[in-house]
Image: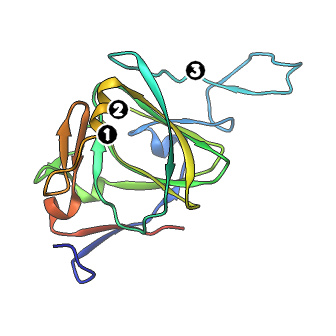
């Protein structure tokens, strides 16, 4: 059972750069490349892209509100039937926790030294590769809004209850509980 005295592994978020985030997905920002030479309104706007949304079935969009939940990593999840894009609404920064799609698993959980955290500015979105392990965003304000991509099976999977170990493996949702798998509390040093 998870307690304050449980052994801990602490992840310190690093600033987001396209290069550092490359093993997990793409960074969508006007500061990042590639930038397209599309002339909107006499060059007063800039365009980043294209970033490809890849899905085995028609994509869906979900708007969700994320409450602050402390610094514990509750689980890591992944989806293999699509890339997943997280778009902040409102301009507040957030923390993204990720592990590569091909990360070695230890007792069915990504190796802890491969789990990374990034501080994502509020005007930047990320597009996760298929299979990238991730936790829903850690918001900087309670009730922070996000738009995320999904598809019918993923949306259905996200509605399922976790099992007695705090895990799920249904539809296109594979969630793994770090404490159950590693015996350690995994914490994120939030800014």
Q: Judge left or right: residue 17 versus residue 164.
A: right
Residue 114: x percent and y percent? 29, 53
User: If the image is split into quadrants, where does the C terminus sit?
Assistant: bottom right
The local crowd at label 1, few if under 14, some if 14 to 19, many if 20 or more residues have their Cα within 10 Å, is: some
Image point 15% across, 51% down: which residue?
163
Q: Is mark 3 on a helix, strand or loop?
A: loop
- The numbered mark, 2 or 3, whose residue comes first in the sequence reads 3
Q: What element carries label 2?
A: helix
The local crowd at label 3, few if under 14, some if 14 to 19, many if 20 or more residues have their Cα within 10 Å, is: few
Residue 84 location, quadrant: top left
Distance (Cα) linking label 1 and label 2: 5 Å
Q: Which mark identifies residue 158?
A: 1
Q: Judge left or right: residue 140 versus residue 162.
A: right
Image point 53% across, 24% down: which residue?
51
Hey, which residue is sitting farthest right in the picture? 42
The answer to whether residue 183 is above or below residue 124 is below
**Residues at marks 1 and 2 touching, judged by CB atoms closer than 8 Å:** yes
Distance (Cα) linking label 1 and label 3: 28 Å
Residue 73: x percent and y percent? 33, 61
Image point 75% across, 16% down: which residue?
38
């Amino acid at each position: 059972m998870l307690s304050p005295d449980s052994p801990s592994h602490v992840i310190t978020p690093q600033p987001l750069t396209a290069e550092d985030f490359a093993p997990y997905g793409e960074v969508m920002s006007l500061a990042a490349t590639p930038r397209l030479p599309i002339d909107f309104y006499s060059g007063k706007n800039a365009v980043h892209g294209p970033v490809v949304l890849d899905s085995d079935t028609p994509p869906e969009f979900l708007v969700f509100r994320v409450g602050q939940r402390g610094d514990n990593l509750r689980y890591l999840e992944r989806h293999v039937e699509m890339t997943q894009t997280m778009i902040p609404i409102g301009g507040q920064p957030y923390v993204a926790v990720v592990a590569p799609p091909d990360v070695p698993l230890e007792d069915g959980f990504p190796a802890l030294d491969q789990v990374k955290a990034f501080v994502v500015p509020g005007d930047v979105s990320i597009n996760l590769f298929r299979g990238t392990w991730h936790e829903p965003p850690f918001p900087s304000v309670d009730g922070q809004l996000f738009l995320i991509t999904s598809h019918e099976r993923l949306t259905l999977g996200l509605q399922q209850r976790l099992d007695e170990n705090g895990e799920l493996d249904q539809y296109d949702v594979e969630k793994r509980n770090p404490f159950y798998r590693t015996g350690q509390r995994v914490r994120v040093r939030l800014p």
